[in-house]
Image: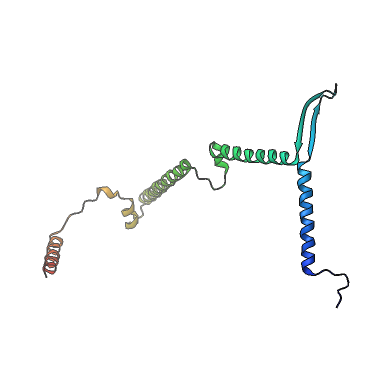
Amino acid sequence: MERNNQETPSAQGATFWLRLVAKWQSFRESMNRKHRLVVMDSDSFKEKYSFELSGTNVFAVVGLGAILLITLTALLIAFTPLRAIVPGYVNPEMVEQTYRNARTLDSLEHALAAQERMIGDMQALISGKPLAVDTAAAAASRDKGTVVYRRSPADSALRAEVEQRNAKTKKK
């Protein structure tokens, strides 16, 4: 059986790799080839600067320049007030100010509600209508620090009885 000038799959792979190696060698040679960059004065055509460059040198300088630029930009943003423009950055002072504002707003809302209740009560008194007693609102507006709790004799007796039962169960 003859294959009409067709290569076997292994021969096709070998030629692929040979072509790839040849291209790589050609690329390396072009990167190592020296070129001259000359800066001249346009009036007198005198040579001001002259550089001998290769593709590898240019690639290295551009790569290092890019890394240096990225590093300087990151440092500039990290250690200056520019970091506030980064999405997701949380400024601790702003967080504290937000909590203070929330507490102030809450207390102002309570004060406004108390004033509105007082104005409503005054209008009711002036018009001669009976006052609506809102025990929940009155309890909420009352200062919690001034409430004095007193024990009744029945409460004291109940506490003594419960303590005696607990003492008996611990002894057993």
Residue shown at the point (18%, 54%) measured from the top left: 150
Quarter placement of the C terminus: bottom left
Residue 167 shown left or right of residue 75 in the figure: left
Q: Nearer the viewer, residue 65 or 89?
A: 65
Outermost residue toward the front in this view? 1
What is the tally of numbered marks visible in this picture? 0
**Where is residue 76, by image quadrant?**
top right
> Where does the image place residue 146, in percent across and percent down from the top left?
25, 48
Quarter placement of the N terminus: bottom right
Q: Nearer the viewer, residue 69 or 45?
A: 45
Q: Nearer the viewer, residue 61 or 149?
A: 61
> Where does the image place residue 32, in percent across and percent down from the top left?
76, 42
Residue shown at the point (35%, 50%) measured from the top left: 125
**Where is residue 164, by image quadrant?**
bottom left
- Vertical relation: 154 (above or below) 85: below
> Where does the image place residue 55, in percent across and percent down from the top left?
75, 41
Residue shown at the point (31%, 54%) measured from the top left: 139
Residue shown at the point (82%, 24%) measured from the top left: 41
- Vertical relation: 139 (above or below) 34: below
